[in-house]
Structures are given as C-alpha cells and as structure tokens.
Amino acid sequence: MKILFVLTSHDKLGDTGKKTGFWVEEFASPYYTLLDKGADITIATPKGGAAPIDPSSDAPDAATAATDRFNKDTVAKEKIANTKVLADMDPDDFDAVFYPGGHGPLWDLTKDGNSIALIEKFNSQQKPIAFVCHAPAVLKDVKNTDGTRLVKGKKVTGFSNSEESAVGLREVVPFLLENMLVENGAFYSNAEDWAPFAIQDGNLITGQNPASSELVAEKLLASLK
C-alpha cells in the first residue's frame, strides 16, 4: 500500500494575524492507522519543505493518543519538516491519496492546479481519494473526465457551517465548505457538531471533523484490501 498524504503550505488565518496550517489529529490518526497496517506513506505539500501545523491543533485540549504519539515520533516529525513537492508526485506511483484538514487548505490547495490535476487522475483511475474536516474544500474545482463537478451527485460530508460558527471563523474563511459542496451539486450531510461521521461514495471518502479522521482512515484501508 503506497499512500500519498497531501498537506497545506499555507499558514496565515486570513487577515486575523493568527497562524493556521494542517490539523495534527487529522494527520496523525490516519497516518498511524495506515502505517501500523504496513502502508508506505509519502507526504507532499504545494511548496515542499516544512508543512505548517495549526497552533490550535497542538494545544492540550486538542490532544489525542495519536497526537501524543506524533509528538514523540522523530521520524514522522522529520517527514513533516521535509515534505516532498506536490508537483513532483505521480499518481501512478500510489494506490490512494489522503488529504488531512485544518483551515490552511482553504487558501492554497483549493486552487492549486497540481492538486486538482492529481485528484482528477486518481479519480479517473478509480483509486481511493479521502478527505477529512476542511480538506473536502480542495474538491471545489475538481472535475470528472466528462467535465462535471466531481462531487456532483455524490454523498459527502465535511466541516459543517455550525462547526465553523462554533469556532468563530465563519467570517474569516474564504468560503463555507458546506455551502460550496451543496452549490457544486453534492448530497451533503453531517452528524451533530464534533461527532465522528464519515461517508463513502464509490472511491470518494469524506469525514466531517477531527473526530472523524480515524473513521476515514479505516474506510480508506478497507478500500485498499
């Protein structure tokens, strides 16, 4: 199992003066779920080099067993500090792709041509494509081979409008993920705020929030068996 993880390179939270990036739990939980089953994981970002960690996800109240393991894992930390360049990644070299969330992807990966082309290629090859929390936002301009929106007619989830309101960033984000998915023709659904919830529709796997990251990883693993 060769799996590509794609992380954001973006670290500015709009005009707030605060930092963002990827959410540690959404990386760590799937990373270890897949690694422990023998997966060979490559990590890439648009710019390569160090992937920015959202400071809020590194706080004690966001800690989980997976984040604790990551904080002690020098090998994983080295990978995060030295990610590959996304443009150099070839979908033919991998069996699946996974995008952790955090607010960072809303700014860079949603309009990154390399990311869009990469997902379109994985999808055309019917390989699993998985996203959690804010990461489904990167599907905004991704299309099927016939030119239709990839999410059109698909059952999906992702960070809900009510969750965005709860974290006080509704007016900060470039767009609301839930609204975008609905506008692009997806059948969006969600569980209550912060509850684990993941959906699979064909090769497309989406999870609602940080608590859903392990569910997404398990669905991805099952798709590769």
Image (tube, rainbow, N blue to C red):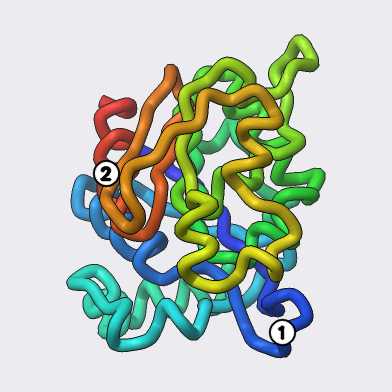
Query: Viewed as shown, does residue 112 lie left or right of 60?
Result: right
Which residue is at a point 23% across and 73% down the rendered structure image?
64
Query: Viewed as shown, does residue 146 lie left or right of 191?
Result: right
Residue 29 location (% of width, % of height): 29, 60
Query: Viewed as shown, does residue 138 lie left or right of 33?
Result: right
Task: Give the residue number, with chain letter if any, for mark 2.
Answer: 215
Which one is nearer the viewer's eye here, 32 or 179?
A: 179
Q: Quadrant of residue 184?
A: top right
Which one is nearer the viewer's eye here, 80 or 155?
A: 155
Task: Give the residue number, with chain letter if any, for mark 1.
Answer: 16
In the image, residue 5 sits, relative to residue 139, either above or below, namely below
Residue 37 visible? yes
Considering only order in the chain, which callout, 1 or 2, is on the residue closer to the N terminus? 1
Which residue is at a point 58% across and 67% down the rendered structure image?
83
Which one is nearer the viewer's eye here, 90 or 53?
A: 53
Q: Quadrant of residue 113?
A: top right
The residue type indicated by label 2 comes to: Leu
